[in-house]
Structures are given as structure tokens and as C-alpha cells.
Image (tube, rainbow, N blue to C red):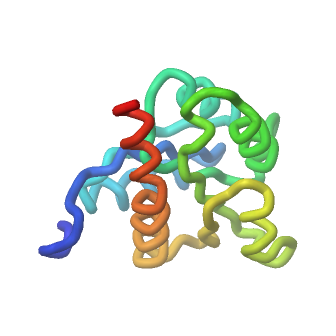
Amino acid sequence: MPPIPGEDARPLKVLHVDDDPMNLRVVQEILGAFGHQAVMACSGAEALERLSVEPFDVMLLDIHMPGMTGIEVIQRLRASNGPERNVPVIALTADVYSRRPAEYVALGFDDFVSKPILVAGLMATIKRCAAARRPAILKRAVG
């Protein structure tokens, strides 16, 4: 789906972190249909490495992953000293009952999207989170 006329049509670079290849592929297709670039990572360690070497507008982060959970990733990311610590992060989880939205925010996430993913909700959340952090990102790039 192309952007709606009059909306900010700037393509976003989105890091999607999930240990399930099917989830990665589905989200890549969704983001591509809206003109955004999806960069995939299969683990928390891979995500942190990618974030340290290239900028992203938003990160979609699965919560339940082997090795390093999404909670561990967000804790390490927010504790880092680099500019990547400010990337907006959206939690992706099928477990909507163990934590309320405010708890995800308290952990350092900017928002969350439940699985199975509804396209309209995912895209609205990405747009909102990217727009909320854009001024800080621009300031960092200039200053």
C-alpha cells in the first residue's frame, strides 16, 4: 500500500528482530508494501551489533527469543552510551496477558504491538514512534 497523500512519505529503515523466520518474512512484506526498508536480525545479539554500526528509525523487537530475550536486549540498548540507545523500540509479543502496556514503557520500550500482527495497528505504531523520536535523531545528526 502506498502512503496516503499528504502524509510523511519518507521511507523508514526498520530493524526487525525475531527468532521466527516466518515472522521476519511477513513483517518484511508488510513494511515493503508501505515503502519502508526492513532489516532483519534473528537474535538479540545480532540486533545489538547491527544497531552499533548503522542507524535505524525504529526497531521491532520480539520479546520471547532464545539466548537473549527482548527484555534483555532493551535493557542493554538503553544502558549503552551510543546514539543507538535512543532508537524507538516497539515490543512484539503474543503474550499480551503477562504485562500491560505501561509495563513495556517502564522497561524502556516506546510501545508494543501484539501478535498476531494487525497491519493497520503495526503501521500506526511505527509511524507514531518514528515521528516522536525524529527531532532527537535530527538534532544528533546535526550536532
Task: Indicate the position of residue 140 as horizontal and vertical percent values.
Answer: 44, 35
Compared across the picture, whether 34 is left or right of 54 comes to left
Q: Residue furthest right?
A: 98
Q: Residue furthest front?
A: 143
Task: Indicate the position of residue 35 as horizontal and vertical percent values.
Answer: 24, 55
On screen, residue 53 above or below 129: above
Q: How many labels does the image show?
A: 0
Compared across the picture, whether 30 is left or right of 7 comes to right
Compared across the picture, whether 51 is left or right of 74 comes to left
- Residue at the (46%, 47%) spot, across then down: 136
Task: Indicate the position of residue 84 as horizontal and vertical percent values.
Answer: 56, 34
Q: In which quarter of the image is residue 107?
A: bottom right
Is residue 1 visible to the viewer in this orientation of the structure? no
- Residue at the (35%, 57%) spot, across then down: 31
Q: Which residue occupies the foreground of this view, 15 or 53?
A: 53
Q: Which residue occupies the foreground of this view, 52 or 66?
A: 52
On screen, residue 85 above or below 91: above
Compared across the picture, whether 120 is left or right of 65 comes to left
Q: In which quarter of the image is residue 81?
A: top right
Could you tell me which quadrant the C terminus lies in?
top left
- Residue at the (49%, 62%) spot, across then down: 129
On screen, residue 59 above or below 121: above
Is residue 94 visible to the viewer in this orientation of the structure? yes
Could you tell me which quadrant the N terminus lies in?
bottom left
- Residue at the (47%, 61%) spot, across then down: 132
Q: Which residue lies furthest to the left in this view?
A: 5
On screen, residue 20 above or below 67: below
Task: Indicate the position of residue 26 as horizontal and vertical percent values.
Answer: 45, 57
